[in-house]
Image: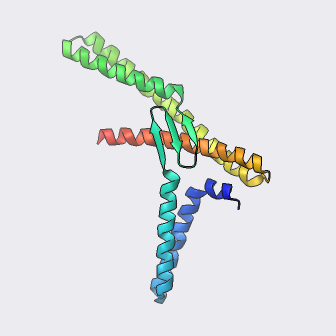
Amino acid sequence: MSENNNTQASTLGSVSQGVAGAVQRGIGQLTGSTKDIQDGTARKLDAEEENERSHASAKLGSVTATAEGGAHVDNKDRQQGSWNQTVGSGKQFVGGLIGNESLRAQGRAQYDEGVRQETSGQASDLAGGYADRIGGAIGGTLNNDKDEQERYKKQHDGGKAAIRSVEKDLQKKADATE
């Protein structure tokens, strides 16, 4: 497997290596083999670190970048939906503050529309991200041309950035509701 393909399979590879390390450690415990326990533990820790690196990303506004160099700009519906939620919440607050039920209702409708827009944009980014990630991994594996492998790697990494972008937004909302 080439270096590009190792990067593309890092999440799945780290999971399988973690399982293999746990099994090796378990066998070492059953047989009393200190070496197997140590090697299995080390393998499992390496897999956990690889998984962490695989999920490393940064999001600034509507742009997400991954540690591998993938980049993604959020779907316009996500951005517009977020804006509509913010404005809608403001209208609801002001309407409630001054006792204007019409403004409160307008705010609620705008907020609800924003949720629908953002959700639609997230679904689009997520579907496109998975398609790019899978297509890039498969294309990079099946192609021997270095330039084509690099193109597929960029496709894969861009898809990964799209997925991480949606994950970060969903986690941010989950954290805010706690």
The answer to whether one can see residue 45 in this image is yes
Instruction: Locate the C terminus by quadrant.
Output: top left
The outermost residue toward the right is 145
Between residue 104 and residue 18, name the one nearer to us.
Answer: 18
Left or right side of 81 for 68: right
At 64% from the left and 42% from the top, the residue drawn is 132
The image shows residue 50, relative to residue 118, as above or below, that is: below
Residue 127, horizontal then vertical, whole percent: 58, 39
Q: Is residue 26 visible to us here?
A: no
- Quarter of the image for residue 93 reads top left
Report whether 54 appears left or right of 6.
Answer: left
Residue 136's x, y, as percent?
68, 46
Where 122 falls versus 83 (above or below)? below
For the point 48% across and 84% down, the residue is 28
Residue shown at the point (40%, 21%) measured from the top left: 84
Quadrant of the frame with the N terminus: bottom right
Q: Total number of numbered labels?
A: 0
